[in-house]
Structures are given as structure tokens and as C-alpha cells.
Amino acid sequence: MHARLGDLTSADVVTPELRARLREDESRLIAVYSPEQVSEMRSWKTWAGPFTLQEMARRAAVPGVMYNLMYRVDSRAVHARDAGYYVEARGGEGLAMRLPEQVEQHLMPASSCVVTTLKLIGEKLGVNRDTELEELMTQIQRVAGV
Amino acid sequence: MPNPRGLERDRIDRIRAQHRAAFDLAERVLQFANDFFAGRRLTCEDGELVARVLSGLCGKMVATFWSILVLAERGLPTSSLARELLETFISVAYIAREESARRAQLYADSDRARDQGHACKAGRSNIC
């Protein structure tokens, strides 16, 4: 939120209610740590420099659909919030661990991602294989039922 | 309970039969990506570092996609690898679209800083 307050393009989405909540959250942290330590925490970055995924995606004008296909949708799995898929209730026999078959979960989105990336790299490095790339993308869309 | 590794052969056969078209196509994509630069001399008007970083990201992408295929044919989770693949795409897009020389230099500097004391990776980075 501090970053957003400093960013003029998104400052308008920071409402007075959000500001009040920020102050409340900060005061809780300051009570546990100290104003100096909380001030230092504000400068922490999860990733170095501009190499945050969101920032790179924004600067590279990556379409939101790419992000949503494999990143946002699956953040639940990556953060281990999908335990329900790995357990089975067997009535009176209690619980059993389940090894699911997550078939094809990413096969076609991943294929699409590879083809799109190759096109970008090819354009930059003078490798023109556009006809083959377009044919592969058509096949991917057909198999994925897009 | 059987060892899960013992289930793999049966799973691979069954899953590949059920999704033959998708696996065949994904393997075509893997082969194409692996051969993408074959017989070509790579050049980049923004400098050799850009070519080096993008080629490296291409290699990483092939390896990650290969891993996804190996896990997918066993019906195992691929979310973290799909995320890694997407992050590779975003890195490529970030470097390729504009300010390529400066962004490749940033990437290389970041790589060099992080490589120091990184015990999990065998060998060393060849970006710089």
C-alpha cells in the first residue's frame, strides 16, 4: 500500500478506509517491534530491483490472460492451499490420503507459453520460424478446444 | 500400500492413452523448442549479452517444459513448474520488448549477485 501511495497511477484506488486500516495495522506492528524496525520493514523488497514478476509483466505489456492462466489460478497449489485434493473421507473408515491424477492440468497452456516465448526470442535474435510457430499454435488451440 | 514409484508405469500408459493428442503435440513443441536455434548463428543488434540471456532463458524454458511433460504423464502436480515457465516467459518479454541492452545487463547483474553462495545450484552461471 505504501508503494501504491507513491505511485500516481494507482493512488486513486487507495481509499480513506484503506488508509485507516493501514494505520491500524502499522500501530499493531509498532507495538510489537519499534517505529524504526517497522520503517525498515517498509523498505524490504520480496525480489531484487525491478525483477518482481508483476513489475516485469507490467513493463513488458504481458496480456493478463497469460498471467491468469498459470499464475493466479494456481497460486493456491503453489502456496499449498489445496490440501483438500489430497485427502479422502471414507465414511466410518476415517480419512485416507489420496494421490490425485492432475492430468493435463498445464500441458496445453504450457505448450502455448513455449510457442509464444519462442516467437519473442526469435524476433529478437533474428530466427524467423514464424510459419512453424503459427502452425503449432493452431494445433494447440485445436487440442485445447479453444 | 505399494510404493508410489511402482505405480508410474501403469499411470504413464493409461494417461498417455487417454490424452494421446495432447501429449503428442506437447512433445512436438518440446522437439521444436529444443531445435529452435539449430544450425543458426545467433545475433542481436542490442549486443551479445542480450543474445546470451535470451538463449539461456530459452534453455531454461525447454528444461522446465520437459519437466512438466514428465510429471503430467504421471498425473503429478505441475503448478510450481508452470509458474516457473510463466516467469521465464515474463523475463523474456521484459528483456526483449524494449531497453533490451539495459535490461539484460540488469538481469546479468542480478544473476551475478545471487549466484554467490547459492549452494542449491551445481556448476555456475554462464550469463556473464
Image: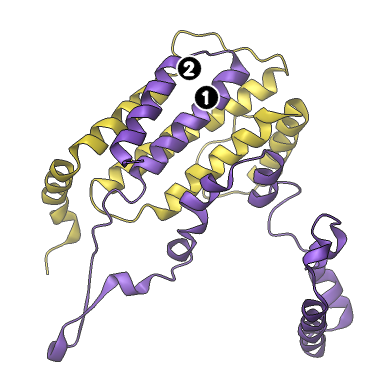
Chain colours: A purple, B yellow
The residue beneath circle 1 is A119
The residue beneath circle 2 is A130
Q: Residue A21 appears in which quarter of the rendering?
A: bottom right
Percent of width and height locating residue B1: 12, 70
As displayed, is residue B81 above or below residue B30? below
Percent of width and height locating residue B60: 49, 35
Q: Residue B98 appears in which quarter of the rendering?
A: top right
Residue type indicated by callout 1: Lys
Q: Residue furthest front?
A: A146
Q: Nearer the viewer, residue A61 or A22?
A: A61
Element type where label 1 sits in the image: helix
Which of the two discs, 2 and 1, labels the residue nearer the N terminus?
Answer: 1
Cα–Cα span, label 2 and label 1: 7 Å
Indicate the chain on which mark 1 is placed.
A
**For the point 18% across and 60% down, which residue is it?**
B4
Can you say which quadrant of the picture contains the C terminus of chain B? top right
Percent of width and height locating residue A69: 47, 50
Indicate the chain on which mark 2 is placed.
A
Residue type indicated by callout 2: Asp
As displayed, is residue A117 above or below residue A63? above
Q: Nearer the viewer, residue B115 or B39?
A: B39
Q: Can residue A43 be seen by looking at this rendering?
A: no
